[in-house]
Image (tube, rainbow, N blue to C red):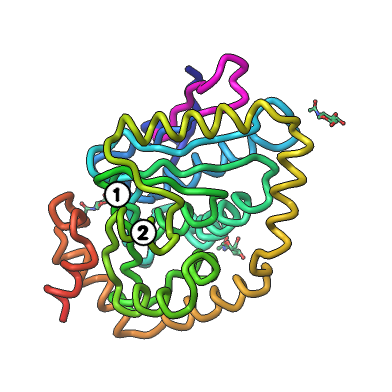
Amino acid sequence: MHILETVWLGAAAAKVLTQACINKACSAKRVTISNPPVNLWDANVIEEFNTFMHSLNNQNETKVVVFDSDTADFWAAHIDLNLFQPDAIPGRNSSALFETYYENLDLLLTTPVIFIGEVNGRAWGAGDEHLLRMDMRFAGPHAQFGAPEAAVGLIHVGALQQLVRLIGPGRASEYMLAAAQVSGHEAARVGWVNSVHPSAEALRNHVDSVATRISLFPVETLRATKASIAEQAPSKSILDNDRARFNQLAAIPQVQQNVEDIIRLSKNQSRSWELNNNDNIVRYLY
Ligand SMILES: *[C@@H]1O[C@H](CO)[C@@H](O)[C@H](O)[C@H]1NC(C)=O
Ligand SMILES: *[C@@H]1O[C@H](CO)[C@@H](O)[C@H](O)[C@H]1NC(C)=O
Ligand SMILES: *[C@@H]1O[C@H](CO)[C@@H](O)[C@H](O)[C@H]1NC(C)=O
């Protein structure tokens, strides 16, 4: 098992992504997100994810990457709301960090590697944005999906377009506008994920077998297939439009107040709050 190194604020930060091989050739890999207690998408995750994505450039060995989590009940939560506060990271430029965040979303579409999300916990906000930009998604019995953004006053900037393509505008409207929490079964029924499996083990077996089988085939073929499917993807200029919408909303004083209130009400994004993040925002903010 290789372990990625990262450094944040000059200090050795906790490693939040670990890698393991799925097959003998290691052409199929598993990357485990480990940022307990809730796998918050914080500065460390953004930076380390970026390092990992760049490690996949100019190489022919890795064909398939599966992203899973070893944090109970969470695949990946939303972005660390503290990053929206002024002076979020002393000595660091947080707008540069947001550029890295969006670069990561873009790299999931453009890196010639097949990305699979294996989800058996919550995928909220930023977690769901990354998940929806992967090539496919599979759920276990404890998976839940959702975008809290509408309840905060924002939009699910990095994944709205992908969700519309996957589940259609009517369903995307319902889930996005209502900041719904969606179970694995419902997600599989509507197409948010490819399929749902009855246990963590069944999920793992299915994902391993898909990843192992794909990785038998020529890398050029996998890349051409991904590129062909990407012909139907929303253009980058549409993401730019959504970023402009997001930034306009984020500048509204009421939205900034909502972010502050949620940090306070949630006791700084505590685990008990995050388990039902969207529903708690609706219940305690409104
Ligand atoms: C990967 O394979 C291509 C041929 O398909 C070759 O041109 C390229 O140099 C290889 N890259 C590396 C880093 O080995
Ligand atoms: C912060 O980063 C942004 C985007 O990378 C850049 O445009 C801006 O000049 C930076 N600001 C400072 C004070 O370094
Ligand atoms: C709130 O949580 C964030 C993310 O875990 C952490 O970086 C920050 O130090 C915490 N702030 C306070 C005031 O506890």
Closer to the camera, 152 or 198? 198
Describe residue 157's horizontal placement relative to residue 24 as left or right.
left
Determine the residue positioned at 49% across, 39% down: 48
Q: Is mark 1 within 8 Å of ligand 3?
A: no
Q: Residue 111: where, in percent of width, then height?
A: 67, 45
Which residue is identified by label 1?
Answer: 143
Q: Is residue 248 above or below residue 204?
A: below
Q: Which mark is residue 187?
A: 2
Q: Which mark is residue 188?
A: none
Q: Is residue 47 above or below residue 149?
A: above
Closer to the camera, 195 or 95? 195
Q: Are marks 1 and 2 in contact (CB under 8 Å)?
A: yes
Q: Residue 168: where, in percent of width, then height?
A: 49, 73
Q: Residue 284: where, in percent of width, then height?
A: 12, 73
Q: Is mark 2 within 8 Å of ligand 3?
A: no
Please, what is the three-letter code of the amino acid marked with disc 2?
Ala
Q: Residue 280: where, in percent of width, then height?
A: 16, 67
Asked if one can make out residue 25 in the rendered structure from this viewpoint, the answer is: yes
Q: Residues within 10 Å of mark 2 (few under 14, many from 20)?
A: many
Badge 1 element:
loop
Q: Residues within 10 Å of mark 1 (few under 14, many from 20)?
A: many
Disc with the residue nearer the chain's start (1 vs 2)? 1
Determine the residue positioned at 31% across, 53% down: 184
Describe residue 50's horizontal placement relative to residue 193 as left or right.
right
Q: CA distance from mark 1 to mark 2?
A: 9 Å
Magenta range is 16-29
Q: In which quadrant of this rendering is ligand 1 seen? A: top right
Please, what is the three-letter code of the amino acid marked with disc 1?
Ala
Determine the residue positioned at 41% across, 49% down: 195
Q: Quadrant of the C terminus?
A: bottom left
Closer to the camera, 237 or 67? 67
Determine the residue positioned at 56% across, 44% down: 50
